[in-house]
Amino acid sequence: MHPDHNGSTDLNTVREVSGAVSAAHLFIYLVPEGAEEAAALGVTDRGPAYLAFRSAAMGAVPWQVTLAAFYNFSPRVVRTMTGVWDAAPPERWQAARFRAAGRAMRRVGVHIPDDQLAEARALIDPVVARADHAGKVLAAANASVPLPSDPLVALWQQITVVREWRGDAHLVVLADNGLGPCDCLVLHTASGGLSTPLVRTTRQWDDEEWNAATARLVARGWLGPDATLTDAGSAARERIEAETDEHCAALWAPIGDAGARRFASLIAPITDAFTAAGTFDGVGNRGGRGARG
């Protein structure tokens, strides 16, 4: 048992463990194993494959449900997933995602000793089991997925649950602050958190939509006339992150500060191995706190 079990969770600790979780999850969107597994299911386009892999835990939902859950993608890109459940049912997509994760982690040499794997699971399992999933669609869906037999991939799936939980909470905060799907991306890229070309390519908001979102942020004083981040915009973005952290404090309460920090250190070898392999080169903020996915 860790000394802070069932204790409160400091917001700095929440920020630390959230970053560690996001970083340990992120590789799945960047590794070639994902494209290979999708191709084996008959889908070779990266966009629809990404949408299918992340949506699979929700079942054979129509693209409109994925759009709602993912929040910051344009309808035109999410609509391209039409037909992915005809190529293969969600259960096969989920199994393929697990295979991709396992293959990728083995390829880059992720190594967590058995005793530390067991310790990590002893910490994260009660977090997932006691999580309040009300309004947390992607987290709840991922929590419902049976864990695979591979211990490392099973740990990664538990990481995925809490990663999506924070993302679900973040969307509530974004909406509460009046930041729509395109607006939040413009603010995030202006702050240097994500590459604008990457976001424009993957989320596919067109020039008119991007410029309109920029104009709204300029009108709020969060961006200057040259679309650069203002002090007010920087403060607003930090406030949004802090409000998200406040939502997540209850998530980590079952293991407290010491448990959360220990969990962050136990999963660090995942991020370290992919960093050493160059997986995150050119991605920008690998933690991805402000714009899920």
Image (cartoon, rainbow, N blue to C red):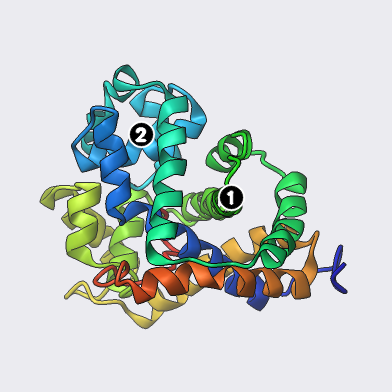
Q: Is residue 236 visible?
A: no
- Pick the quarter of the image with the N terminus: bottom right
- Disc 2 is placed on an element classified as helix
Give residue 34's position: percent from left, percent from top. Answer: 32, 46
Q: Which residue is mark 2?
A: 52
- The reply to whether callout 2 and callout 1 are in contact (CB within 8 Å) is no
- Disc 1 is placed on an element classified as helix
Please determine whether, in this image, residue 81 is positioned above or below residue 14: above
Q: Is residue 45 visible?
A: yes
Give residue 280's position: percent from left, percent from top. Answer: 32, 69
Quarter holding residue 108: bottom left
User: Label 2 vs label 1: CA separation?
Assistant: 19 Å
Q: Nearer the viewer, mark 2 or mark 1?
A: 2
In this rendering, would 19 be left or right of 257?
A: left
Please determine whether, in this image, residue 258 is positioned above or below residue 216: below
Give residue 78's position: percent from left, percent from top. Answer: 28, 35
